[in-house]
Amino acid sequence: MSNDKQKALIIVDVQNDFCPGGSLAVTHGDEVVAPLNELIKQFLDRGEPVFKTRDWHPAKTKHFKAYGGVWPVHCVQGTLGAEFHPDLIDDPRITIISKGIDESADGYSGFDGTNLGQLLRQQNVAEVWVGGLATDYCVKHTVLDALHEGFKVKALGDAMRAVNVNPADGAKAVEEMRDAGAEILEQSAVARP
Ligand SMILES: [Zn+2]
């Protein structure tokens, strides 16, 4: 591996429970799979690191409505709903980052309570490309944390979808990411690195 600064792809929570038919389905959530698969191929072909985060909650967590949170039960460790969307490319070179394990925290960000930042620095990553589900929660928090940790961020506008508890939440989240310093790519798979 060279010492040059490199890019990494971070795919946030493309799991069954966030896709149509899941317990916390994001409208058109499965539409992110095709552009993300294209990017996975490009990054792996260039030998660049690819990470998939997954929401990986205990059955009892304050993140869920029943225990004081706001969300229905989703992505409980070991369940079908917590598995990655079946069409999302699987490859042994991809590193899986489990988050949301702490029963006292929401764990929206891929950096929250994980070693993602450490792994990126170890691999000399300077820039991360971030897409997945959902724009207004886990993608946004992952992007903001990546910026906070000093990474350059390209947010994949065409490869993220929002929960939109309020209809404008997704658009607001994109503005927030842009204001914080992320570049928003609208045609990520054809963007030149
Ligand atoms: Zn969650």
Image (cartoon, rainbow, N blue to C red):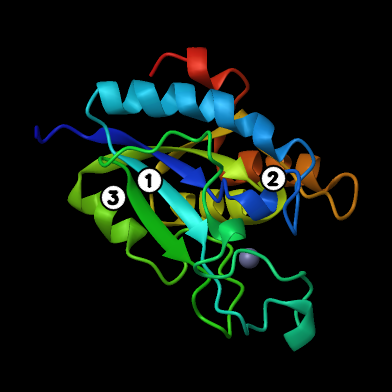
Q: Is mark 2 within 8 Å of ligand 1?
A: no
Mark 3, residue position? 120
Q: Does residue 149 sit above or below 192 in this rendering? A: below
Mark 2, residue position? 19
Q: Earlier in the sequence, mark 3 or mark 2?
A: 2
Please tell me in which quadrant of the rendered image residue 175 appears.
top right
| Crowd class of label 1 (few under 14; some 14 to 19; many from 20; radius 10 Å) | many
At label 2, which amino acid type do we have?
Cys
At label 3, which amino acid type do we have?
Leu
Q: Secondary structure at mark 2?
A: loop
| Crowd class of label 2 (few under 14; some 14 to 19; many from 20; radius 10 Å) | many
Picture residue at 78% right of the left edge, 84% below the top: 66
Give the distance between the C-alpha atoms of the residues marked 3 and 2, in whole angstroms. 28 Å
Q: Does residue 98 sit above or below 152 in this rendering? A: below
Can see residue 137?
Answer: yes
Ligand 1 located in image quadrant: bottom right
**In the rendered view, does 119 fall on the left or right side of 109?**
left
Give percent across and percent down for residue 116. 35, 58
Label 1–label 3 contact, CB within 8 A: no
Give percent across and percent down for residue 36. 51, 29
| Crowd class of label 3 (few under 14; some 14 to 19; many from 20; radius 10 Å) | some
Mark 1, residue position? 51
Give the distance between the C-alpha atoms of the residues marked 2 and 1, in whole angstroms. 19 Å
Label 3–label 2 contact, CB within 8 A: no
Q: Earlier in the sequence, mark 2 or mark 1?
A: 2
